[in-house]
Amino acid sequence: MSEETTPVHGLFDLVIRGQRILTTAGITAREVGIRNGVIVAIEPLGNGLQGTEVIDLADDETLIPGLVDTHVHVNEPGRTEWEGFASATRAAAAGGVTTIIDMPLNSIPPTTNVEGLKLKREVAEDQAFVDVGFWGGAIPGNKSDLRPLHDEGVFGFKCFLLHSGVDEFPHLEADEMEEDMAELKSFDSLMIVHAEDSHAIDHAPHPGGAHYSTFLASRPRGAENKAIAEVIERARWTGARAHILHLSSSDALPMIASAKRDGVRLTVETCPHYLTLMAEEIPDGATAYKCCPPIREASNRELLWQGLQDGTIDCIVSDHSPSTLDLKDLENGDFAVAWGGVSSLQLGLSLIWTEARHRGIPLEQVVSWMSEKPASLAGLHNKGQLALGYDADFSIFAHDDAFVVDVKKLKHKNPITPYDGKALSGVVRKTYLRGHEIDGRTPSGKLIRRGGV
């Protein structure tokens, strides 16, 4: 019997046994013992750990660590009709996500000072079904708010290099971003950047009308590439940590790889929509697909997958950016008018697994991109793996099961997603937070802070 089991003579709050437990050693036959919401024993299957509750996995089930989604727009307070903490965290749990980090904009007020953060925490407190952390915002004139927000536990700071889409969250010019990066370097925080260049977009064609190709031409790869180059150089000059949000342009991969080789402290995410959808297949007027930066061509998608596999891209997160149906301009299908954002919080694991298995990519790798790597990005040292001392956050995943997406059955607030009607592989059967099944009725999520365990 191992050291972990001796103090309690093998009695745990919960024991999970199965042939397919995704540990740090890969998928293997194990028994997992949980006490007080923490994993305290991992033993070979057959060791007979005893628990107040015991779960035996079916042969078609894999126990995987809870996913960590560091890019979610919850929009509450202020635009709660778009989304809210109860609906967003229910959707997260249904998709095997046990921790989200909420973006600082689209709520009113935005999280650009301590007062805004406190208000958001008050609203979220008794509504969260999964653990929730918060990003701060970096906007013109709030440099003096960055350190206080950091001290209050935000995980880093988001800025835009072009109009954010909402007036109460103005963008930074590159010089302002550099100044804020230098400030963040002084307390080793992280700048996360929506990298599209407004000048390049100003020179691009106007996006009006129902043709997706027109919209795509209005957000050229060059706008992303130019902005990413700015982020890289400003991070190089300041020594600050920087993170590229929702990478869609594969053109940028060589310069990102080069910057990483040079020692620039850079990380990069991409999203399920860039890895599973392609511009050539988006119907006219289908504004559910509109997001910024946009979904690009099939050839671009293949290069993003390569970037993941060679480590240039670090992680996959949702960028769940919902809105009300009327803001998507469904009647006219005008891509210039519609709100830009894809709703996919509940579907990410199945979306990526469906694509990955066709490419011969194992489930362990998918979960690493969606759990371990985002947890590392946010400095969550007790999340993202099934390992001793980690929170007992996990889901039971039926990797060979399949389902057809029905938007009316999804848990997020407004029934729109570009994936409606799509057949996907992999079903999340149950999700657990700190060793307790999330039932969708009793919120048990905690509000988490940077550096907290």
Image (spheres, helix red, strand yellow):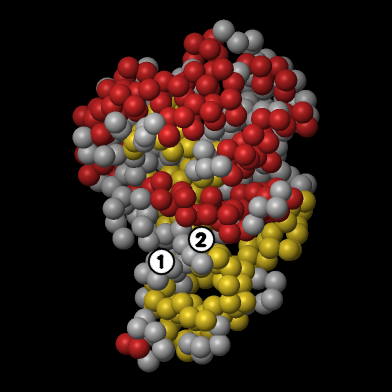
Name the quadrant of the N terminus.
bottom left
- In depth, the one of 58 and 134 nearer the eye is 58
Q: How far apart are marks 1 and 2 (CA)?
A: 9 Å
**What residue would you read off at disc 1?**
391
Seen from this angle, which residue lies furthest top?
Answer: 203
Is there a contact, CB below 8 Å, between mark 1 and mark 2?
Answer: yes
**Residue density around tag 1, few if under 14, some if 14–19, many if 20 or more, within 10 Å:** many
Task: Determine the secondary structure under disc 2.
Answer: loop
**Residue 248 visible in the current orientation:** yes
**Residue 447 visible in the current orientation:** no
Q: What residue type is labelled 2?
A: Gly
Seen from this angle, which residue lies furthest bottom?
Answer: 9
Residue 327 in picture, x, y percent from top left: 61, 30
**What residue would you read off at disc 2?**
66
* Drawn side of residue 136 relative to residue 100, left or right: left
* Drawn side of residue 85 relative to residue 345, left or right: left
Q: Which amino acid does label 1 sit on?
A: Asp
- In depth, the one of 133 and 307 nearer the eye is 307
Q: In which quarter of the image is residue 250?
A: top right
**Residue density around tag 2, few if under 14, some if 14–19, many if 20 or more, within 10 Å:** many
Residue at position x 70%, y 71% in the image: 60
Residue 436 in picture, x, y percent from top left: 48, 72
* Drawn side of residue 302 relative to residue 385, left or right: right
Up the image or down, 231 lies above or below 20; here it is above
Task: Determine the secondary structure under disc 1.
Answer: loop
- In depth, the one of 271 and 307 nearer the eye is 307
Up the image or down, 401 lies above or below 113; here it is below
Q: Which of marks 1 and 2 is nearer the N terminus?
A: 2
Residue at position x 59%, y 53% in the image: 366
